[in-house]
Amino acid sequence: MSTALVVSILVAYFAVLILISVLTSKNADSDSFFSGNKKSSWYLVAFGMIGTSLSGVTFVSVPGGVGAGAWHYYQLVLGFFIGYFVVAYVLLPLYYKYNLTSIYRYLEYRLGFNAYKWGAGYFILSRTLGATVRLYLVINVLQLFVLDEIGFPFWLTTLIIMIMIVVYTLKGGVKTIVWTDTLQTIFMLLALVVCIISIQQTLGWDWTTIWHKMQGKNMTSLWGTDVMKKDYFLKHIIGGAFITITMTGMDQEMMQKNISVKTLKDAQKNIVSFSFVLLLVNALFLFLGGLLYLYAQQNGWEFAPDDMFPSIVRDHLPKGIFLIFIIGLISALFPSVDGAITALTSSFCIDILGFQRRTDLNEKQKVRLRKQIHIGFAVLFTLLVFFFKWKDDKSIIDLIFVIAGYTYGPLLGLFSFGILTKRSISSAKIPIVPIVCILAPLMCYGLDFYSKQLFGDYKFGNEMLIINGTLTFVMLFLFSKKEADLTQEIAKNGFDLNASN
């Protein structure tokens, strides 16, 4: 593959993103950046969320996991599906009721300023770690299978990608991302479908034959029935539901686009329609994984799970298919990073710096400061990617994901306590919320670390998130008291119950 062709594709792709940015960021202000002026179309948000939810890691790893795990991942997807209805009909009504730009202000209203800051802080930590790990893994795939061959260094690839993302998100924010994510989702799904059809034609079998061969090799097994293993079906389904509730419904990046829709009813249509589409898209990724393994076994090839998809497409399919794969991979990369940087900028400006409270900054000063923070997060992302490359250690990446997962437990506990009870945190001098939010994840880590001694062969899976949230909830309850007059608290914290939805 020629260097000129690869560069031409990247330049053309970038040019389209810049054009969208220019068109969507005219007369943009802070409100446009943070909330899209509450004018986003629900169907665009729903479609674009596919690209955000299915990152570049999903694009490569889910097909590669079929060989060892069959369709057990789909149990998790079914859990996701259930969780989206909780997001649509429990959490979204709260966010629209109080006309929130940052969802963590709900915690301030219910549980006080400490809960608000710790909720936002956990989001910033989680999203920074998670997004940079995903960015690193996808850039690594691009390097190994494309850019190393043409002499393009890793550091330059990273810088160019980060500069591209900053350029098209710096001004328009959410308003721009709603459109760019839609375009990138189209490219990603196009690559998925084209690769499936290409491999099917190469195998020369009809779809019925392919499905029967997958069944014969136990690649379509759906249910995990061993309660001691991580992929036991109840762990996956219940855990998947709570993953969606926390990592979508309590995550500023995912909710920022949803609450940019004008009305609650439209935002709910967005979530529900997206949840059905996600069932189909994940099924296609798993079906692709089965095709890849059939093709590899037919030819006696062996690959590491994460290398299978890019290796087969690059070395054994027409070059045009590989180009489409690269476009799809890039399209899977950008939505998981551009939205993260925008949401982190929004959360830092609103939750940490208090943009909505401060009267000492005019609009021009806010825009300047917001751009500086946006660039600052881009620099942080770049440095973390360089750090992961320097360490080049899979165990560190796995640890980062574990840590990021633990940080959503306190968010689950805080939001659940606020929604399910009418109690308030004790006003004692002891900082209850910070202590609880630190202690619960530490207790979960200890539980997992000593699981063999305590529970024998039992392996914790996604249920650890629920345990983490439950511990947070219980400790908050123990140090709480009956709620005072809620109306006074609402007024004290500056919420407008009569705000238009």
Image: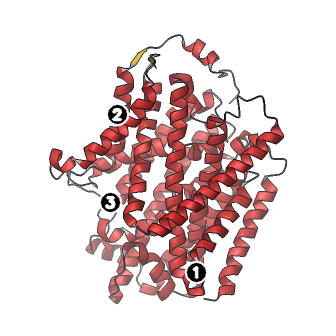
Considering the numbered disc 1 on the image, is that residue within a helix, a strand or a loop?
Answer: helix
**Rendered position, 327 above or below 299:** above
> In front here: 74 or 136?
136
Left or right relative to 315: residue 362: right
The N terminus sits in image quarter: bottom right
Q: Which residue lies furthest to the top in this view?
A: 485
Type of amino acid at the residue the image marks with label 2: Thr
Q: In what quadrant of the picture does the C terminus appear? A: top right
Residue tagged 1: 147
Q: What residue type is labelled 1?
A: Leu
Residue at the spot x=65%, y=43% of the render? 346
Disc 1 versus disc 2: distance between alpha carbons?
46 Å
Q: Which residue occupies the foreground of this view, 405 or 335? A: 405
Q: Position of residue 86 (x, y in %)?
A: 47, 38
Q: What residue type is labelled 3?
A: His
**Comparing labels 2 and 3, the label whose residue is closer to the camera:** 2
Q: What residue is rendered at 32% in x and 60% in y?
A: 72
**Residue 310 left/right relative to 9:** left
* Left/right of residue 71 with respect to residue 141 in the rendered view: left
Circle 2 crowding by C-alpha within 10 Å: few under 14, some 14–19, many from 20: many
Instruction: Give the label, 3 or 1, closer to the camera.
Output: 1
| Lower position in the chain sequence, tag 1 or tag 2 | 1
Q: Can residue 355 be seen in this view?
A: yes
Residue closer to the observer: 47 or 235:
235
Q: What element carries label 3?
A: loop
Q: Residue 470 carries which label?
A: 2
Image spot of residue 70 (x, y percent): 32, 66
Return the mark for residue 72. Answer: 3
| x and y percentages locating residue 217 in the rendered image | 27, 74
Q: Which of marks 1 and 2 is in front?
A: 1
